[in-house]
Amino acid sequence: MMDQWKESSEEEEEEEQQPSDQSVLPTGSQDQLEDEEKPTQAQEVTSGDEWDTDLETDKATNEKQCLSCAELYLQACWWTGSVPVSSFLRHLGEASLNLNHYGVGPLGAKALAIVLQNDIVVTNLELEDNGLGAEGARYMVEMLQTNISIQSLNLSNNQLHLEGAHIISKMLLDNYYIKSLKLSGNDFDDSAVKYFADALKGDYVVKELDLSHNRFCNTGGEHLGHMLATNVGIEVLNLSWNHLRMGGAVALSAGLKVNSTLKQLQLSWNGFGHIEAESLGQALKQNSTLVLLDLSSNRIDDQAATLLCQGLAANDTLRVLKLSQNPLTNIGALTLLKTVTNNMKSAVEEIDISTVFVCEAFVELLEKACQGRPALDVRHSAMSSVTRNSSALQIFQKFLEERNESIMDFFQALDKEGTTKVSTSAFRKAVKAANIPLDQRQLEWLIRMFDKKCTATIIYSQFAELS
């Protein structure tokens, strides 16, 4: 089918006295590309490096304008020996080009680069999990030297390794258009992250950077910390699924203290514990831009949560805190909630501790907090008994409302002498006599709520606000 299309194309071009198909394609060869010198691990990143490209010549550029995108892509695939991706042909003319998981490979990446180097339509290019390797990344970088429309690039899970990191970092040194870059799962280590950190110091173009699912450790954290201290562009940084513990986390937190642009920081699955929580807590005291912090699936227990709260007590910008899948208990959950509610300047609107089973005291405090902060959303878990008990007050109030009574009316009816006090035994008998639909556990929880000091006496005047 490709031969038939080629012959037909040649006949049409001869009739129109256009150059042959071969002149439409780049003049270099694949053998020449493979002989090109590749960067070594010791090679330094410099802004003066220039790329050699065999994607096109000036003559080829002019002749490509005579072809449609589809024709150019098919010819590029034929010339590179790659299999055309049908999804590319189906979505021509769309701003978002999603080619994730299509097995494009290095040669397929070269064919795409030939077509996209002068494209002005595509703004989002998705190439995750395509086995591009460093060679395919090189073609994408060459393409980006002339393409000025692509702003979002996803090269996650493409086995880029250290060489690919070097290639992409060189692009970042002269980048004016890529605002979102996803590089998750490319086996980058501390040496690779140094390339990115050096290239992004002082950068203001890249707004979103995903480096999750790599192998950054202490040294990598130090590089990232230095980058955060000088970077003035990144707003979203994903470092989940790395190994940024101990010194790496401390260095990262130090950079966070002085950073003035980062809004979202994702650090799940990094093994953070006491030391890391304390350093992040200290960073939150000084940071004034971060609005989301994701610490899910770490080793943050009740003590670590207390250390983190040292920063939350003074922070007035953080809105979302994610702590699910951590060894927190109800004690740590209460500490978090009390810290947020006691900080009058706190901006926290969402706390995710959905894997923590809380007690009635937590539920009670949350309900009270939500009265003053209606937007506050704390995701938590609770046993059915806790949920049932915590609803006792609402059941009690609803019953009285149906009888056009208030809680104060109920207590005053029992207080014949006007002492503003009622014994717990008298209250218990009155509730049962009135057939209020509370089971025994709910009734006892309600009594404990009214008699917090366990004096067997309820001073009901302090509950006037409940009426």
Image (cartoon, rainbow, N blue to C red):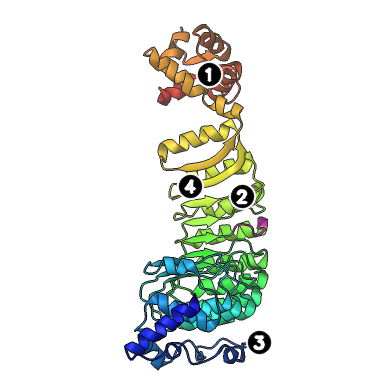
Residue 392 visible within the image: yes
Which amino acid, by three-letter code, is at mark 3? Ala
Quadrant occupied by the C terminus? top left
Disc 1 from disc 3: Cα separation: 76 Å
Q: Which is more toward the observer, 388 or 426?
A: 388
Looking at the image, is mark 4 or mark 1 earlier in the sequence? 4
Q: Which mark is residue 458?
A: 1
Judging by the rendered image, the residue that carries numbered circle 3 is 42
Which amino acid, by three-letter code, is at mark 4? Glu
Report the span colored magenta: 268-274
Looking at the image, is mark 4 or mark 2 earlier in the sequence? 2
Task: Please name which of the two marks, 3 or 4, marks the residue nearer to the observer.
Answer: 3
Residue 113 visible within the image: no
Residue displayed at 49% across by 60% down: 264
Q: Which is more toward the observer, 254 or 93?
A: 93
Looking at the image, is mark 3 or mark 4 earlier in the sequence? 3
Q: Which mark is residue 350?
A: 4
Q: Which is more toward the observer, 305 or 69?
A: 69
Q: Say whether residue 271 is magenta.
A: yes
Task: Please name which of the two marks, 4 or 1, marks the residue nearer to the observer.
Answer: 4
Image location of residue 321, percent across then percent down:
52, 51
Could you tell me what secondary structure mostly forms the magenta stretch? loop
